[in-house]
Amino acid sequence: MTTSPALVWFRRDLRVADQPTFLAAGEGTPALALFVLDPHLIKPAGEARLWFLYGCLRDLDQSLGGRLLVVEGDPVDVVPRVARAIGAGTVHIAADFGPYGQDRDRAVERALAEEDRELVRTGSPYAVAPGRVRSGDGGRYRVFTPFSKVWADHGWRAPADTGAGSLAWIDPATVGVSATAVPTPPDVDATLPEPGERAARRRWREFVRDHLHEYADGRDRPDQPGTSRMSVYLKYGCVHPRTLLADLAAGTSAGARSYRNELAWRDFYADVLDQRPDSARRNYDRAFDALVTDSGPDADRLFAAWQEGRTGFPVVDAGMRQLLAEGWMHNRVRMITASFLVKDLHLPWWWGARHFMRLLVDGDLASNQHGWQWVAGTGTDAAPFFRVFNPVLQGERFDPDGDYVRTYVRELAGVTGKAVHKPWTLPDGPPAGYPSPVVDHKHERAVALDRYQAVQEARRRKP
């Protein structure tokens, strides 16, 4: 009996280890590996993300012995055409739960069905796929803490035992489909992490060995190498979260527990976006549609100062300059910079979210948009609306010696200790070339509280 070929369509799973789609295709089955350069996703991606993506594709192609077919175009046209070319009865994917991804996959599924071909979804980019974690009455969660408890009880599968040799890869040159080479990564000014599955596994081993034991406390210190830097590898599926969770399974340390909790947050936000696709662009809590935000030339000027890291608040500026320099920002500083944009500058959270998504190499729609709404107080598990991060106190607490600020704000390199967080208090004002603060935090905090309070009062008055 001859086995018909299978098509394996890679998307956010750019790896060969722990790859359930290989098992679904059937071990030893002739298969063609495909990646589609989808203009809907490529065009809005910043150069840093494209640089990393193309590097991951090169690494995957090498793992497959040079047998990755890369085609540019709309997947609704490309995938059925490639499946037809090799006579594939099945097309194998990891399920996508993003708004665009779900619509795309349904359209591809319909196009394949017209030719009696099947789109087979196996696994997802998450430890527990959206929709699996349910309350006792079958409902979906809108608050993280109860979600995380059920998530942990639900558990996840062990990593799939797969590798490049799990399938008999078809040579793309024999298929007769017009293909493109893996694009050359664009020139970028940022210093970016090494892309690919092998780099991901190496980075994870180093983190577990050197920093996991201090992660519970160290992850909040931008001046120390206490974070894993695995978010970008999870974003592109160079490693699956269940692989990380398997390594953490025996860990009872505070660091291991804290890391598992962060992976639960990732799954939670994916679940929320699956429930409410509109929350990618709008307030999850629609009452905050009434929140007054600023606009006009002054708002644009302040937004530009924030983007460029020239607000006069050192820890904010350090974070924004780190983003420009590395395509990444420490998570504690993401919260500080987001709070500053929304509650000191009174600008819409989606301005900042869009800027982050353009520059962050690890930009993940669900985590990014809902992280911003957590800070803005408009989403699930929203921080109390009266929580406004004081950038000076946050800097002093989490960068106590000023090392983080001095790394990225070179104008302050000669300022020692905690004084680096308050350059405007120096006898002669800010160091040459560094701006004075663009706003008065105490005043803007009061303005923000008044505006948020107005929304709360309107909510209470609503019948």
Image: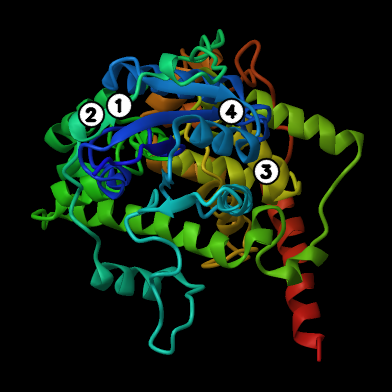
Q: Mark 4 points at which residue?
A: 359
* Point 52% across, 9% down: residue: 184
In depth, the one of 43 and 168 nearer the eye is 168
Distance in Å between CA atoms under marks 1 and 2: 9 Å
Mark carried by residue 183:
none
Discs 3, 4 touching: Cβ within 8 Å: no
The image position of residue 172, as x and y in percent, is: 42, 19
Q: Image quarter for residue 388?
A: bottom right
Q: Closer to the camera: disc 1 or disc 3?
A: 1
Q: Is residue 391 left or right of residue 65?
A: right
For mark 2, does the 10 Å Cα neighbourhood hold few (<14), some (14 to 19), or many (20 or more) residues?
Answer: some
In depth, the one of 169 and 397 nearer the eye is 169
For mark 4, does the 10 Å Cα neighbourhood hold few (<14), some (14 to 19), or many (20 or more) residues?
Answer: many
Mark carried by residue 169:
1
Query: The residue tagged with tag 4: helix, strand or loop?
Result: helix
Distance in Å between CA atoms under marks 1 and 4: 35 Å
Query: The residue tagged with tag 2: helix, strand or loop?
Result: helix
Q: Mark 2 points at which residue?
A: 164
Classify the position of the N terminus by image quarter: top left
Residue type (three-letter) at the residue carrying disc 4: Leu
Residue type (three-letter) at the residue carrying disc 3: Leu
Q: Is residue 277 above or below residue 57?
A: below
Earlier-in-chain disc, 1 versus 3: 1
Residue type (three-letter) at the residue carrying disc 1: Trp
Q: In this view, does 365 lie above or below 152?
A: above
Query: The residue tagged with tag 3: helix, strand or loop?
Result: helix
